[in-house]
Amino acid sequence: MPNKDIPNESKLPVSLKDVNKNYKKPEKRNELVPNEKYEKIDSDVGDLVKLGTNGVVYVAEDAFPTLFQTTRPKGGYIFENQIPETDRRTQDGKDYAHSSSVVGLLDKKSQEVRDTEKQAALQYARDSLINISDSDQAQTMRRMVDSFTKKNLPKLRKERGKKYDEVTGERPKKGFAFHHINPKELHTDPEDVLNPSKGINVNLNNHNDIHRKNINDENQLKEYIEKRNNEPENEE
């Protein structure tokens, strides 16, 4: 099940909106597939796929039987066991998956299945999600997120609430700033970017050293901090 009990401290408010059902419909790759199958995919995508105010497209677990051309129990199994936990979320009592995980899995299964009718349906479902993600509606939302993020990034140091260098424990110096424990250039979750619990406050010399040493995730940062704190006091 998605993590329901872990509070999200991100300053980016997230709610899920209905997608515009006039999104561009994909190519029907196999004309021998009954049109009712394509229409069922269109219907479920229109009703059960949502656009988050974080710019991310989400797919409800209830859509999995149709998208993956399977039964409801097997759709539930796919959601629980083949979608990474980090790509699942619960919103307003319903379980959703990040569309990128769903797209990747649909693509994988469409390449592996040998039933040409099912292959065409999986491809159609995959392409429907891609088209929604590329839609004007989604792009407009992402521009809004970008603007909101730029306004709020400078507030993270204060929101973090730590008035000392979290690498060395030193007092703040000129250039004291917030550093993301998972650099936003590599870890692009828009909620994490504005989450003060997903970073540390550091002085400029340590901030530069972290980037110079190519620290790229929170585990590497933890090792870096431990190493720094085990160095002799006269070493910088």
Image (cartoon, rainbow, N blue to C red):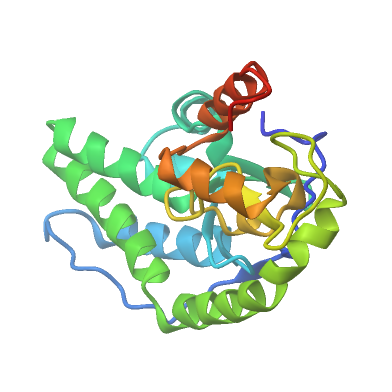
Pick the residue in front: 25 or 158. Answer: 158
The vertical placement of 122 against 78, above or below, is: below
Residue 110, image x, y percentages: 21, 40
With 162 as the anchor, is 127 left or right in this view? left
With 61 as the anchor, is 40 left or right in this view? left
Residue 163 visible, this orientation: yes
Residue 20 visible, this orientation: no
- At 86% from the left and 50% from the top, the residue drawn is 163
- At 47% from the left and 33% from the top, the residue drawn is 83
Residue 13, image x, y percentages: 75, 65
Pick the residue in front: 188 or 139. Answer: 188
The vertical placement of 38 against 89, above or below, is: below
With 128 as the anchor, is 193 left or right in this view? right
Q: Quarter holding the C terminus?
A: top right
* Residue 174, picture quadrant: bottom right
- At 46% from the left and 47% from the top, the residue drawn is 211
Residue 53, image x, y percentages: 64, 69
Pick the residue in front: 164 or 71. Answer: 164
